Amino acid sequence: MVAMPHLPTPAKPTATRKDVARLAGVSTAVVSYVVNGGPKRVSPATEAKVREAIAVLGYRPNAAARALKLGSSEMLGMVVPDMTSPFFATLAHAVEEAAAARGYALLMVNSGGSLAAERRAVEHLASRRVDGVFLSSVLFEPDLRELEAVEIPAVLLNHSTESPGFDSVGVDFVQAGRDAVDHLVSHGHRNIGLVMGISTSGDLDGREAGWRMGLERAGLPIGPVMRQHFDRDGGYQAGKWLLNSSERPTAVFASSDLIAVGLLRAFHEGGVRVPEDVAIVSFDGLAESEYCWPPLTTLAQPVEEMAQAAVEALVGGGGHKSNRRFSATLVRRASCGCAAP
Amino acid sequence: MVAMPHLPTPAKPTATRKDVARLAGVSTAVVSYVVNGGPKRVSPATEAKVREAIAVLGYRPNAAARALKLGSSEMLGMVVPDMTSPFFATLAHAVEEAAAARGYALLMVNSGGSLAAERRAVEHLASRRVDGVFLSSVLFEPDLRELEAVEIPAVLLNHSTESPGFDSVGVDFVQAGRDAVDHLVSHGHRNIGLVMGISTSGDLDGREAGWRMGLERAGLPIGPVMRQHFDRDGGYQAGKWLLNSSERPTAVFASSDLIAVGLLRAFHEGGVRVPEDVAIVSFDGLAESEYCWPPLTTLAQPVEEMAQAAVEALVGGGGHKSNRRFSATLVRRASCGCAAP
DNA sequence: GTGAAAGCGCTAACAC
DNA sequence: GTGTTAGCGCTTTCAC
């Protein structure tokens, strides 16, 4: 038998707290005390020995063991329809940062926008023992019963209607719709359409309600409504339809920046000028809205603050449920006619 | 003493495997057998009793305990510079799906594009005991020593140069650069510039190398190079510079779609027509590239396949390290002059 | 086909 | 200030 020249993996098993204790010549309890900074005090000399041993061994606490003991994984779950969509990516990013600031990791799941998949995702997160979950359904009402069944603190993120018994944070859609219309009216428009994203949730979308309200308050007739998906292609389809429409509105409120981007493409193809022929105000405030042509006037959601509030609601220890509502703020750019493009 | 009318939280502690065993009248081992489908067989009658008990109690296995016992968390980690950037969002989404298909959850961390933060992230993921990590550094070389130190299987994702001893998957940047130039040459361009994203990694970016190569092969002079950030604003700045440049190239290769989007905005502002005055070919193949104006001709990365390959490398059990290189494919749209905008 | 029991790595109450 | 130890919920070997 020939001797092995060299073992590729020296089979160095990960160091445990026990190894550290042995090397430092203390008990495992003491190691815990220094690693966790408590609950007991440790003499500086001992602490130094322990830290030394930790460094030497490259010791790293085992989160699974800790989670098992503590009954808390120090992880939060987030389910979004599709993180590929810029708004959710931005939101998830902000949530990740806010959670990390409080020592929580974020487990992200895409539901693909289906209720069944969302339910599965929640179920899955529950068995991972996340300490809480953020639910960003948009296309439908989340399954509140399921949420209650898994008994995990949850916050409905990006949810405009209040759900008693649940934390929620969202923006005031109605206000945003009204602001969009008001702004368009201030530019002299009297025929203002709406391109609305499709959702199967029962309630009327606040943006639509706000748009109507704005129109009524201004004494204007209700303009044409196009219903399409919430994405670029949805806007593109709506735009093509608008191109052939006999009585084209002089302005539209697009319920998402992505829809507006799609409109823009259709208008470019059809030779319709924005804002001269049709003015646009949209909603979301994505980075993309600033770089398309012309740049979009949009009602920007305060994503950072919403993320902060959501994390706060989940791990802030506040206790009772809260429904935080934020305001979108109008960002004036060229698509409405405010700035020269 | 007055009787409590109703306890708000009936203090229903989460059911454990023990509870299930008791209710079903079997041992805890048997419960494991049915939950995991092994390693022993269970009689149909017993299995039915167990499933019944599970349903009644709403039992859900505790992943932390399982992870502790098995030494595997069934989670994978992914660190990206910024998931807000469409390319990484798309990549992360694809990775999440591929991982989920194999039963792994994805722990996502944003490094903000700093080496130190990336190191911290890896450290953090290591202590969470992820079974593997995807590293997508772009702005710098990843810290390979650190990766070795934490002893977690890793794959360098979106990494163009091969790193011996590490799995990696990426696209052939050089080829893409050459293809971009070839295509522009086929449109008759002879003065082709480059807008390159900035990275602090030592090596010359393959896209730049490919661009040079393409030019040389075609016997053309090396056009102007602009170096800017990899984002929309980087492209915008480059575009403004180009506007005032005395010898403006008739075409440019943009090293990312986002850069191209920024160029487009600057060109619109400056009244430079695309593709008539300046043609553009970019790189990435984002959804956004199809909806800007004019739509971008771009070298699309096969994101799905890259994600699949990365997950496969990590959990496929293949064993030895591999370096998978994919090709970007040219998507012809209007910005190069191929299609009528 | 079923069960008893050891032990994964950690925390913290309790004893000294 | 430090050490001992029970036990978190699970998997699996080994006995029956």
Image (tube, coloured by chain):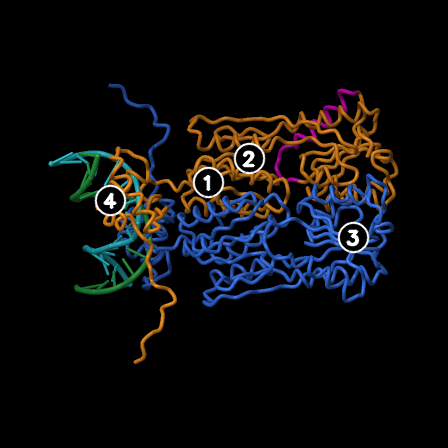
Chain colours: A orange, B blue, C cyan, D green
Task: Name the chain under label 4.
Answer: A
Determine whether label 3 and label 1 are within 8 Å by CB: no
Distance in Å between CA atoms under marks 3 and 4: 63 Å
Task: Name the chain under label 3.
Answer: B
Distance in Å between CA atoms under marks 4 and 2: 42 Å
Q: What is the crowding at mark 4: few (fewer than 14 residues within 10 Å), some, or many (at least 20)?
A: some
Distance in Å between CA atoms under marks 3 and 1: 43 Å
Circle 3: element type: strand
Q: Position of residue B302 (x, y in %)?
A: 64, 59
Q: Nearer the viewer, mark 3 or mark 2?
A: 3
The number of discs equals: 4
Task: Name the chain under label 1.
Answer: A
Q: Could you tell which of marks 1 and 2 lies nearer the N-terminus?
A: 1
Which residue is identified by label 3? B280
| Amino acid on which disc 4 is placed | Thr
Is B224 colored magenta in this rendering? no
Q: Nearer the viewer, mark 3 or mark 1?
A: 3
Is A200 colored magenta in this rendering? yes
Which residue is identified by label 2? A157
Q: Position of residue B249 (x, y in %)?
A: 82, 52
Which residue is identified by label 4? A28
Task: Name the chain under label 2.
Answer: A
Mark drawn on residue A76: 1
Which residue lies at the image location 86% right of the left edge and 49% below the top edge? B277
Mark drawn on residue B5: none
In this view, the residue farthest toward the bottom is A1
Q: Could you tell which of marks 4 and 2 lies nearer the N-terminus?
A: 4
| Amino acid on which disc 3 is placed | Ile
Circle 4: element type: helix
- Report the span colored magenta: A199-218
Which residue lies at the image location 32% right of the left edge and 50% below the top edge? A56
Q: Nearer the viewer, residue A276 or A41?
A: A41
